Amino acid sequence: MPLNLQRFLESLHYLRSFGASGVGWGVVRPAFSAADIDARAWLASELRACGLEVHVDPAGSVFGIAKGQSLLLGSHTDSQPEGGWLDGALGVMAALEIAKARFEDGLTPVSVVSFQDEEGRFGVTTGSAIWAGTLDLKTAEALMDRDGVTFRDARAMMGGKREIFVEPQRFSGFIEMHIEQGPVMDETSDIVGVVSDIVGIRDMKIVFEGQQNHAGTTPMAIRRDAFQALSAFNALLNERLRNVVTPQTVWTIGQVSLYPNASSIVPGKVVFSMQWLDGDSDRLARMESVIRETAEEIADTHEMALKYDPLLGLEPVAMDTYLREALEQSAQEHAPKQWRVMPSGALHDATNVSALMPAAMLFVPSIGGISHDFAEDTKEDDLMMGLKVLAGAVDRLI
């Protein structure tokens, strides 16, 4: 297949122009933002140009579908609020280049997808979760972002959506190319990673509500300070999880909303995210028990009302052996002695899609292990090598 490597790089940079942050090569392209909607419209036009039928599903995911049953390639094009230019975008632009090259050479076509809201403005890999049936659309519509905007209202901003979802039976399997988003390959000579399995995730919001009061006249001993409750919860949780987790387990409080968020007021309420990831379902469940028990104890000792929002999550999954073998054979051909089999410590759309069809993933290194940051980057040679390995696997499969 005659890949156009320069065109591939140019497509990546053109996609970056939608929501370019002006800081390095970073992007600000959250799901259903104007930049995201414009980027998806551009992608749709590119897909039509290589002979694919464009289908924008009710959740806002953009498919370019080949006739008959086909192999599906892709990822997502939305970003974090302060995102990198390659996260998700790499997989979609690699899929687009392969679709273009096969169209130009008259080869069996592939299908392409950019799933909506992988980055979790509203949930956890929202678009692919809805398609896979792990999250129904009615439930998703009530999900809110950090500013109180619902998924229903956000998706109404995007025109051209169809009322039906694409039938998964249209596809023989799914391969997602992605940056590693971690330091493992960057610290070695490896330039390609074939993913063996993907971690599971749990994510929920927790609310502590105490008593808002005057910061100058309320004695420390009688305060019901929501931030102090959060601080105590975080310290105690880290201590208690120590005997439950492994070195690969991670947990994060990444979003905090303090009310009323004023310097002269004792905060009466805090809403914060609690996310944890691990490759073992039982450990994820044990962590949930520890988190809830710790929150209840802190709420009691700090005189807080306690509330949990719905728990969202996905189970750990293993990648399909047959698709993996094609990726491994291609990696050995194009990058001998410079590839490895490795787990994914981050969540991806492939987790959801694996419930519908065989799924696999391919990684390229992240410079410095940095992702979800404007500084996110990968060497051009590594980007092109990843594309060659993906294309080689496609040749073997179809």
Image (cartoon, rainbow, N blue to C red):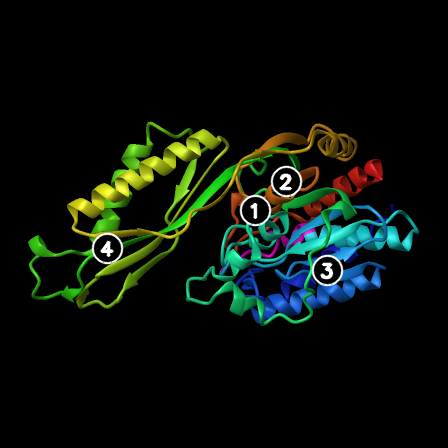
Amino acid type, callout 2:
Ala
Q: Position of residue 317 (x, y in %)?
A: 58, 34
Label 3 with label 2: CB-CB less than 8 Å: no
List the single residue furthest toward the right. Answer: 106
Residue ID for mark 2: 355
N-term-proximal mark, 3 vs 4: 3
**190 or 80: nearer the viewer:** 80
Stretch of the chain drawn in magenta: 82-91
- Which secondary structure class fits the magenta region best? loop
Of tags 3 and 1, the one toward the viewer is 1
Amino acid type, callout 3:
Ser
Tell me how far mark 3 sits from mark 4, CA to CA.
45 Å
The crowding category of the residue bearing disc 3, from other C-alpha atoms within 10 Å (few below 14, some 14 to 19, many at least 20), is many
Residue 5 in sight? no
Residue 86 among magenta residues: yes
N-term-proximal mark, 1 vs 2: 1
Instruction: Assign a secondary structure to mark 2.
Output: loop
Residue ID for mark 3: 11
Residue drawn at x 51%, y 56% is 139
Residue drawn at x 32%, y 40% is 291
Q: Position of residue 82 (x, y in %)?
A: 49, 60
Q: Which dot marks residue 339?
A: none
Residue ID for mark 4: 227
Residue 323 among magenta residues: no
The crowding category of the residue bearing disc 1, from other C-alpha atoms within 10 Å (few below 14, some 14 to 19, many at least 20), is some
